[in-house]
Image (cartoon, grey):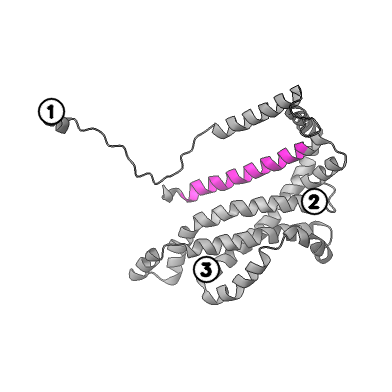
């Protein structure tokens, strides 16, 4: 029996995956479809009041009408433009400042207290001030989104730089790598996962602030559309706007996930 055991060893399952998440396609979509089906059923049989939630089919019809009349793009394109400009400013400056804080002690001592003071301030509360400074047009909206995405990006970036394995840095120094080479080849690649994770939070905050900014002094935009629907208590239009925002969040998260898979393939 022992000879047979040696000749036909039992396979040992691999247990070194390190809890690496596996992509399982279709589960999220199935959960979403089941939730929508439950709400549709509940509103039709009276289990859920139509004054509380509209029928998903009615929301879909409203969304389809937005597409057919062209109003979807009339509201969506200005919102995308504001989000892109504001978030690009906030994220770009935030990553730069966060890297500087992570690398230089003097800059850390000077800027971390300032960032800590700005971070907990509700940025929506600053909108009237930005309107006074930059006017009621696009400038105040860009500034609000930029500030809202700046502070979480800074915190995520210098935290990611701090978490880079110092053993790798010492190893690079022992091999004679210069300062710029260590930053470019070790620090930035090591910090990139944390930076991209923080970017998800920053963009989500940017979308929230986008809606708030468009509710003040904007004729077109998803926020203006939702405000108008809410003032008329038109739940179908209001939820259609919410669906658009939800889709925008899913698309931006998917884009960041695509970037992660491309630039962080070395983590596999």
Q: Is residue 106 above or below residue 24?
A: below
Task: Tell me the residue that label 1 is attached to.
Answer: 1
The CA distance from mark 2 to mark 3 is 35 Å
Residue 193 colored in magenta in the image: no
**Location of residue 171 in the rendering, given as x and y in whole percent from the top left corner:** 35, 66
Q: Image quarter for residue 35?
A: top right
As drawn, the residue found furthest toward the top would be 45
Task: Tell me the residue that label 2 is attached to.
Answer: 214
Task: Tell me the residue that label 3 is attached to.
Answer: 102
**Location of residue 131 in the rendering, given as x and y in whole percent from the top left corner:** 82, 62
Of helix, strand and loop, which one carries label 1?
loop
Of helix, strand and loop, which one carries label 3?
helix
In the image, taking residue 102 as reference, residue 139 lies left or right, namely: right
Nearest to N terminus: mark 2 or mark 3: 3
The CA distance from mark 1 to mark 3 is 62 Å
Nearest to N terminus: mark 1 or mark 3: 1
**Location of residue 68 in the rendering, given as x and y in whole percent from the top left corner:** 79, 31
Is residue 82 something that shows in the picture? Answer: no
In the image, taking residue 109 as reference, residue 215 lies left or right, namely: right
In the image, taking residue 43 as reference, residue 162 lies left or right, namely: left
Q: In which quarter of the image is the N terminus?
A: top left
Numbered range of the magenta stretch: 239-264
The CA distance from mark 1 to mark 2 is 77 Å
As drawn, the residue found furthest toward the front would be 47
């Amino acid at each position: 029996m022992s000879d047979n055991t040696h000749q036909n060893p039992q396979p040992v399952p691999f247990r070194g995956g390190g809890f690496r998440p596996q992509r399982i396609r279709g589960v999220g979509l199935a959960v979403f479809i089941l939730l929508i089906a439950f709400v549709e059923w509940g509103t039709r049989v009276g289990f859920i009041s139509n004054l509380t939630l509209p029928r998903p089919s009615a929301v879909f019809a409203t969304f389809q009408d937005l597409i057919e009349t062209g109003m979807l793009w009339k509201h969506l394109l200005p919102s995308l433009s504001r989000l892109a400009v504001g978030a690009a400013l906030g994220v770009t400056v935030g990553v730069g400042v966060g890297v500087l804080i992570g690398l230089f002690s003097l800059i850390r001592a000077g800027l971390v207290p300032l960032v800590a003071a700005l971070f907990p301030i509700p940025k929506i509360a600053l909108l009237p001030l930005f309107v006074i400074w930059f006017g009621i047009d696009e400038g105040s909206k860009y500034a609000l989104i930029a500030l809202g995405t700046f502070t979480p990006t800074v915190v995520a970036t210098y935290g990611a730089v701090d978490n880079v394995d110092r053993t790798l840095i010492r190893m690079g120094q022992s091999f004679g790598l210069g300062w710029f080479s260590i930053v470019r080849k070790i620090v930035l690649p090591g910090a990139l996962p944390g930076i991209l994770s923080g970017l998800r939070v920053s963009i989500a905050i940017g979308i929230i602030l986008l809606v708030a900014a468009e509710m003040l002094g904007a004729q077109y935009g998803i926020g203006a559309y939702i405000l108008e629907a809410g003032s008329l208590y038109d739940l179908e239009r209001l939820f259609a706007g919410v669906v658009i925002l939800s889709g925008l969040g899913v698309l931006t998260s998917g884009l960041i996930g695509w970037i992660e898979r491309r630039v962080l393939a070395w983590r596999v």
